[in-house]
Amino acid sequence: MLPIRRLALKDGQSGTTTTAWILMLDMTVRPYPQKYTRLNDEDYLFEGLEDDFEAELSVDELGLVTDYLDAWQAITQLPR
């Protein structure tokens, strides 16, 4: 949610950011560059730039991710 809101992309625009990943086994922190492309009002393409990972994310009107691959889905939605 934070990168999506911070980038404030318009439909079709892309932006990059770097997050901090904490590796729990050895408690190290490393940078993880990412790219987000806004596909439409509700969908973004997420790309991990170091590992070629891609996922389409669905968000609500606040930019909260509501659907992530087949891994999880939000169980409640904000009232409209």
Image (cartoon, rainbow, N blue to C red):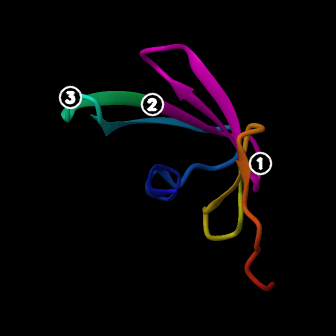
- Specify the label residue 40 is tagged with: 1
Magenta stretch holds residue 46: yes
Quadrant housing the C terminus:
bottom right
The residue under label 3 is which amino acid type? Asp
The residue under label 1 is which amino acid type? Asn
Mark 2 and mark 1 lie on one chain; the one further toward the N terminus is 2
Eye-nearest disc, 2 or 3: 3
Q: CA distance from mark 3 to mark 1?
A: 39 Å
Q: Residues within 10 Å of mark 2 (few under 14, many from 20)?
A: many
Mark 3 and mark 1 lie on one chain; the one further toward the N terminus is 3
Mark 2 and mark 3 lie on one chain; the one further toward the N terminus is 3
The answer to which of 63 and 9 lies nearer the viewer is 63
Quadrant of the rendered image containing residue 21: top left
- Specify the label residue 26 is tagged with: 3
Which residue occupies 53% across, 52% down? 4
Which residue occupies 69% across, 69% down? 61
The local secondary structure at tag 3 comes to loop
Name the residue carrying label 2: 34
Query: Which residues fall within the magenta stretch?
Result: 34-57
**Image: 26 above or below 60:** above
Left or right: 54 in relation to 70: left
The local secondary structure at tag 1 comes to loop
**Image: 1 above or below 36:** below
